[in-house]
Structure formats: C-alpha cells, structure tokens
Amino acid sequence: MAKFKQIGIDVEVSRAIEANRLSFSETENDILRRMMTGARPQRLPSPKFNPPILLQGKRNRGAWSVVVNGEKSAAASLTSAYQTMLLSLAGQDSGFLEKFSARRARTRLFVARRPEALYGNSPHLAIDFAKPLTDGWYFDTNLSLQQIAQRARAAAEVSGLRYGVDLYIAKEGEAI
C-alpha cells in the first residue's frame, strides 16, 4: 500500500489539477503524477451519456465533461468545459478559431484576437471576463449556461460536427 502525505494547495493549483482530469475515477495523485512525469494519458473509453437535454438554472460547479468525436475530457466548471471544448476543436482544426471568430451573439464575438473586441459596445468587460485561450486568442467567461450551450452548438456547426452526437458539453451525464 502506498503511503500518502497530506499537502496544502491553493485554489489556482486545484483548478490546474481539475483541468487535467481525464476521468472522474482519476485521483488527484494520478493527475499530478501524469503532469509531473509528462506521461501520455491512456485513452479512456467513452461513457454512454443520456440523450442531450437542456439543463435549467445558473452556471455552477460540478461534474462537467466535454465530448468531441468520442473523446471525453473532464472539467471542474462550466467555463472550463467551454474552454476545453474550444481548445479541443482548435487542436483538431487549425482554422477553427478563425472561422469561429466570425460568429457573434448580438454585439459579442465568441472568440477574438483582442480581449476588448469580445464585448462590442462594452469593452471595459474585458478587464474582468476576457481570458486567454491559445496563441493570441481570447474567449468570454461571463456567460450563462444557455449562452455556452448556444456557443457550443455554433462551434459544432462551424466544425461540421453534430451537436449532441459528435460534440457536446455535459453535466453529470446530461448534455446542455
């Protein structure tokens, strides 16, 4: 039996651990070991999810996951699930972010090269809510569950994927 030592970590380190979680059965020790050694993760079998339904209510923390072409990734929050989805799609298609940047909801862009460009008439929101995504791209984190669901559907369309089948964000097995 392995001996364990208890350590204290701050919220930022905890978020980094959760952002690297591949399955809900994976322990924090497993995640840290993989992160520190650079070991390649084993491909996990894709779980069977209930048919996609719209979750009601506010964004919150919990057992979130993202599925892109059968590959499941765990996320600690709705925002990190959205970020994971964007990064996964960008990793599969180098032109995805450029194509997705043409999409918008009213005055807000879905992704942008400049943080303040995300917010149209309210560029001051970038200070608190624009977060770096990758390679000079930014995304909005001030989004409700319904707004993220809308953006996930648009991302599927841009990628040529079927939302709810090839691509979806889910909480505890129920797609948004």
Image: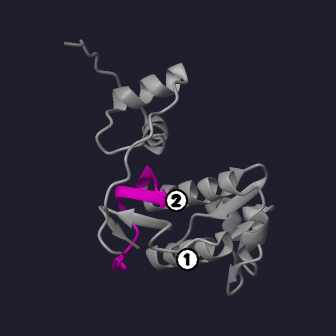
> Considering only vertical position in the picture, is 137 above or below 13?
below
Residue at horizontal 75 percent and vertical 79 percent from the top: 120
**Residue 64 appears in view:** yes
- Depth check: 176 or 15 in front? 176
Query: Distance of mark 1 from mark 2, alpha carbons?
Result: 12 Å
Q: Amino acid at mark 1?
A: Arg
Q: Position of residue 158 (x, y in %)?
A: 68, 73
Check if residue 68 falls in the magenta segment. yes
Q: Amino acid at mark 2?
A: Val
Say which quarter of the image contains residue 62. bottom left
Q: Residues within 10 Å of mark 1 (few under 14, many from 20)?
A: many
- The total number of labels drawn is 2
Residue at numbered disc 2 = 68
**Element class at badge 2:** strand
> Considering only vertical position in the picture, is 102 above or below 75?
below
Give the residues drawn in magenta, as a range.
52-76
Residue at horizontal 57 percent and vertical 57 percent from the top: 83
Q: Position of residue 12 (x, y in %)?
A: 49, 39
Q: Position of residue 139 (x, y in %)?
A: 66, 62
Residue at horizontal 64 percent and vertical 72 percent from the top: 160
Q: Position of residue 7 (x, y in %)?
A: 34, 22
**Element class at badge 1:** helix
Residue at numbered disc 1 = 153
Tell me the quadrant of the picture where the C terminus can be found. Answer: bottom left
Say which quarter of the image contains residue 26. top left
